[in-house]
């Protein structure tokens, strides 16, 4: 299991950046803006490539308190989501500097969405990734059989909720983007 921090500061791909960490009643938001990117990031998704980092992109991470997953929304320069990324873990917390972390269980859920009239986000496609990493962690003793089962349970639950439009962290991020609590 990996201790995965939500901070992106100092990323080798980015020459100029800003990051704000905000405590909310039920979690924390890490709002990262990549002003100048030296190495854009393009990732595979269901047989095609998605650009999720370039100059002007923004990543908004929400780590709800007491949950086994966290959401990062990758936004293009116009503010439209390029990808939704759910980290699946076995709990998490907040480091001494206020940055949230998750005890990462390797599986992640990716999604893309359409922005509907009125501003709602409708998830159109999802994919669970890093299955081989989870299985290797089990074989290598880095996760227990119970954690392996938990990872699959949480990933499937997140995927189902994303598709149904009931994944609560998504609405928290969407609301934050329209009214950033500042």
Image (cartoon, rainbow, N blue to C red):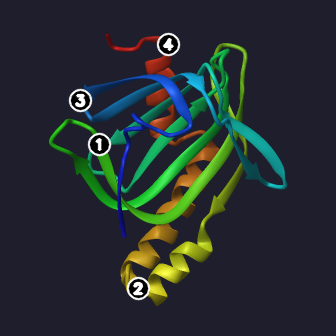
- In the rendering, at what x and y percent does residue 57 appear? 60, 24
Looking at the image, is mark 3 or mark 4 earlier in the sequence? Answer: 3
Residue assigned mark 3: 25
> What quarter of the picture does the N terminus occupy?
bottom left
Q: Residues within 10 Å of mark 2 (few under 14, many from 20)?
A: some
Front one among 26 and 59: 59
Front one among 28 and 56: 56
> What quarter of the picture does the C terminus occupy?
top left
For residue 26, side relative to residue 42 (left or right): left
Q: Secondary structure at mark 2?
A: helix
Q: Is residue 105 above or below residue 166?
A: below
Disc 3 to disc 2, C-alpha distance: 33 Å
Residue assigned mark 1: 100
Q: Is residue 117 above or below residue 30?
A: above
Disc 1 to disc 4, C-alpha distance: 22 Å
Looking at the image, is mark 3 or mark 1 earlier in the sequence? Answer: 3
Residue assigned mark 4: 178
Kindly identify which numbered label has been placed on residue 78. Answer: none
Numbered disc in front, either 1 or 2: 1
Q: Residue at x 52, y 58 (%)?
A: 157
Label count reads 4
Of all residues shown, which one is farthest toward the left?
96
Residue assigned mark 2: 145
Whether tag 1 and tag 4 are in contact, CB under 8 A, the answer is no
Looking at the image, is mark 1 or mark 4 earlier in the sequence? Answer: 1
Q: Residue at x 40, y 14 (%)?
A: 180
Disc 4 to disc 2, C-alpha distance: 41 Å
For residue 79, side relative to residue 42 (left or right): left
Whether tag 3 and tag 4 are in contact, CB under 8 A, the answer is no
Q: Residue at x 25, y 28 (%)?
A: 23
Q: Secondary structure at mark 1?
A: strand
């Amino acid at each position: 299991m990996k201790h995965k921090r939500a901070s992106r500061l100092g990323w080798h791909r980015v020459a100029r950046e800003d990051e704000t960490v905000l405590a909310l009643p039920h979690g924390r938001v890490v709002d990262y803006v990549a002003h100048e990117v030296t190495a854009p990031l393009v990732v595979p998704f269901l047989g095609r490539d998605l650009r999720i980092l370039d100059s002007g992109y923004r990543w908004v991470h929400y780590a709800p308190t007491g949950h086994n997953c966290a959401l990062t929304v990758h936004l293009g320069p116009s503010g439209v989501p390029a990808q939704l990324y759910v980290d699946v873990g076995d709990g998490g917390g907040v480091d001494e500097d206020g940055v949230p972390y998750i005890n990462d269980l390797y599986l992640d859920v990716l999604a893309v969405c359409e922005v509907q009239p009125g501003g709602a986000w409708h998830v159109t496609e999802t994919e669970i990734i890093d299955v081989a990493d989870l299985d290797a962690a089990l074989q290598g003793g880095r996760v227990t059989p119970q954690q392996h089962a938990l990872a699959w349970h949480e990933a499937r639950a997140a995927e189902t909720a994303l598709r149904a439009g009931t994944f609560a962290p998504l609405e928290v991020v969407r609301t934050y983007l329209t009214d950033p609590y500042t």
